[in-house]
Each structure stands twice: as C-alpha cells, then as structure tokens.
Image (tube, rainbow, N blue to C red):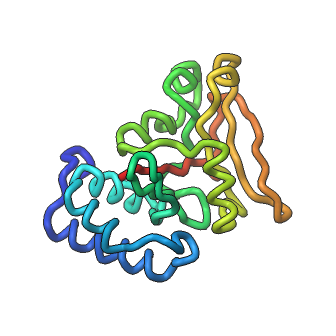
Amino acid sequence: MANSRKLSSVQQRELLLLLTSRFEKNKHRHKDLNWDIVRQKLETRTDKLWSLYEMERTGGEPDVVEYDKKTDEYIFYDCSPETPKGRRSLCYDREAWESRKAHKPSGNAIDMADEMGVQLLTEAQYFTLQKINPVDLKTSSWLRTPPEVRELGGAIFGDRRYDRIFVYHNGAESYYAARGFRGLLRI
C-alpha cells in the first residue's frame, strides 16, 4: 500500500471515521475549527489522505492543530504521546546515514518524511504541540534542523522531561531506539 500512494474507498472511509473521532475527542487541540470544513478539504485531496494514512500507520495519531489563514490550510501534527513507533531508530538525513561506516540504521528521518509527504516539525512547532499536549515524556523526536547547525554535522531533537521542554543537539548520524520524528501535513 505504501508504494501506491492511493487508498481504497474502504481505507479512506475508515481513516476519515478515525480522524473524525479523534477530532471530536480532542477539541482542546482545535477549539475554533470546524471538522466539516476540514473533512471537505480532505475528501478532495486524496494525496493528502494517503499521507495522513501513513502518519497513522506508523503510529503518529495525526490531528488538526492549526489553521493558517494566509494559505487557507489546516495543519495536522503527529499527536501521539510518544514519538511514533514506526519511525524510530533513524538518523537525521541521508548524508548522515551514508556517513555511517558500521551499524547503519534502516533509514533516516528526512527521507522517510519525504516519502510520506510530510515535514518534520520545527522547534517552534514542537513547542506549540507541547503547549497543547505534553508529548515525548519517554522518547525524543528529531526536529527540522537549521542549515547552519546541519552544515556543522549536527541535528536537533526535542523531548519533555521534568515538566520542561528541552531541545538538544546530536551528531546527525546518531540514532536511538527511543528517537524518531513527528511530522506535519498542510491541507
């Protein structure tokens, strides 16, 4: 399924039911948004439905978190309590992955996000998500790294410990069983 980028009508219906239920159960994430409008947009963008399906399939529990008035886009974030299980043990990007001589992980966060049609959260977006829902209490998530940090070989990630949000750095080639990435999708 992941290669076809097209969902069956049954998969579309099941995903929309799941997203509707999640939207209704988590109104604190989107107080002023109307699900009917979001759903209408989703029903006309099957490519975006496929990306949401991938977010869900890999454990992200996507939900609407923001609305961008300038672009008229609804923004879904991965809202799972911990970094998505199906996206862990990845180094940051292809360059980092290729630089590893031994014990290479199965892939990297940037390429996987691209394949899914999503973007990694920025540091600011991660803080937004943390204000809405405390996440990554036991795990951590790679964040979109500023070019000046990446050019020096590093990458940033975030987590929540001691009731505080921390953003750290690591070599981009590092990977851990408890570190993955959170994505966002604009619709």
182 vs 107: above or below: below
Q: Is residue 3 left or right of residue 89?
A: left
Please state the horizontal and vertical placement of residue 34, each as a whole percent of the image.
39, 73
The residue depicted at 46 percent of the width and 64 percent of the height is 64
Please state the horizontal and vertical placement of residue 41, each as a whole percent of the image.
27, 60
**Extreme-left residue of the structure:** 9
Q: Nearer the viewer, residue 80 or 64?
A: 64
Picture mark count = 0
Q: Nearer the viewer, residue 37 or 47?
A: 37
Q: Quadrant of residue 42?
A: bottom left
Q: Quadrant of residue 170?
A: top right
62 vs 69: above or below: below
Q: Is residue 118 left or right of residue 162?
A: left
Q: Is residue 144 left or right of residue 187?
A: right
The residue depicted at 44 percent of the width and 76 percent of the height is 22
The residue depicted at 66 percent of the width and 33 percent of the height is 174
Q: Nearer the viewer, residue 80 or 30?
A: 30
Please state the horizontal and vertical placement of residue 104, each as a whole percent of the image.
54, 31
Q: Nearer the viewer, residue 172 or 167?
A: 167
88 vs 43: above or below: above
Q: Is residue 101 visible?
A: no
Q: Is residue 65 visible?
A: yes
**Extreme-right residue of the structure:** 162
The residue depicted at 44 percent of the width and 81 percent of the height is 24
